[in-house]
Amino acid sequence: MRKITAPFLLVTGIAGTCLTAAVADGATNNVSPVYRVSLPDGYRDWRVITIAHEAGNNNDIRAILGNDIAVKAFREGTRPFPDGAAIARLAYVYQSSPENDAVFPAPQSFVAGDPTNVQISVKDSKKYADSGGWGYGQFENGIANQSEPLLKSCFACHTKLGPSKDLVFSHYSP
C-alpha cells in the first residue's frame, strides 16, 4: 500500500499544481487578442448610456453602459472622449414575450433573451494610437473571444463613422 501511495500523492500533487497554474493563468489572461482588453471589474454596475436594437443577422437588443468618464463625456458632448473612458455593449437575443403579449390585445412585447456577448471599448490615445485611441474586446460567457480577425474588424467598422463621433456608434439618451 505504501509503494502505491507515495507515487500517487506525488502525481496528484503535480497535477493539482498544474491545474491551479492553468486556472490562474486563464483568469489573468482573459483578454482579447490584438488590443489586450479585459472585462472591467464592476462593468455591470456602470450607468446606462442608451439602449439599441440591431436588426438583420444579429437581431439583438443592446444595453450600452459607460464608466463615469464615458458617461460624463456623453452628457457633456465631449469629443474626442478622454482617456480612461470605457463603454460596454451588452447584447441579448431580441425575442417576443408571449407572457407579456397575453396582456395586450395583439403581440407587441419584446424582451431581452439569452445573452449573446459583451463588447468593451476602452479609450487610451497612447496605447491604442494605431486604432484611433480605442481598444476593443468581445466576450462570450465572460470569456474573451480569441478571434483576431473579429477584433481587427472592430476598428475597420468604427472608422466608417465621421470624426465628430470619435469612432463611437452610440449617443447619449437622457
Image (tube, rainbow, N blue to C red):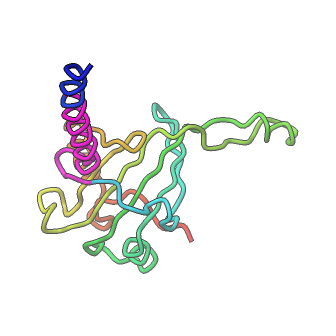
The answer to whether 79 appears left or right of 17 in the picture is: right
Relative to residue 65, is residue 34 depicted above or below? above
Q: Measured from the top left, where is residue 52 in percent x and y? A: 52, 52
Residue 156, x across and y down, in percent: 22, 46
- Magenta stretch: give its range: 11-37
111 or 2, which is in the foreground? 2
Residue under the image location 25 percent in, 73 percent down: 83
Q: Residue at x 46, y 61 (%)?
A: 65
Q: Give the residue furthest to the bottom.
A: 76
- Along the line of sight, the residue nearer the viewer: 43 or 102: 43
Left/right of residue 104 with respect to residue 163 in the rendered view: right
Q: Is residue 14 magenta?
A: yes
The dominant secondary structure in magenta is: helix
Q: Is residue 84 left or right of residue 71?
A: left
Residue at 26% over, 36% down? 16
- Looking at the rendered image, the quarter that the C terminus falls into is bottom right
**Quarter residue 17 falls in:** top left
Give the residue at x 54% y 56%. 51
87 within the magenta span: no
Quarter-of-image position of residue 166: bottom left
Question: Which quarter of the rendering shows the N terminus?
Answer: top left
Picture coordinates of residue 154 (x, y %)?
27, 46
- Number of dots carrying numbers: 0
Furthest residue to the front? 2
User: Please, is residue 58 above or below residue 64 in the view?
Assistant: above
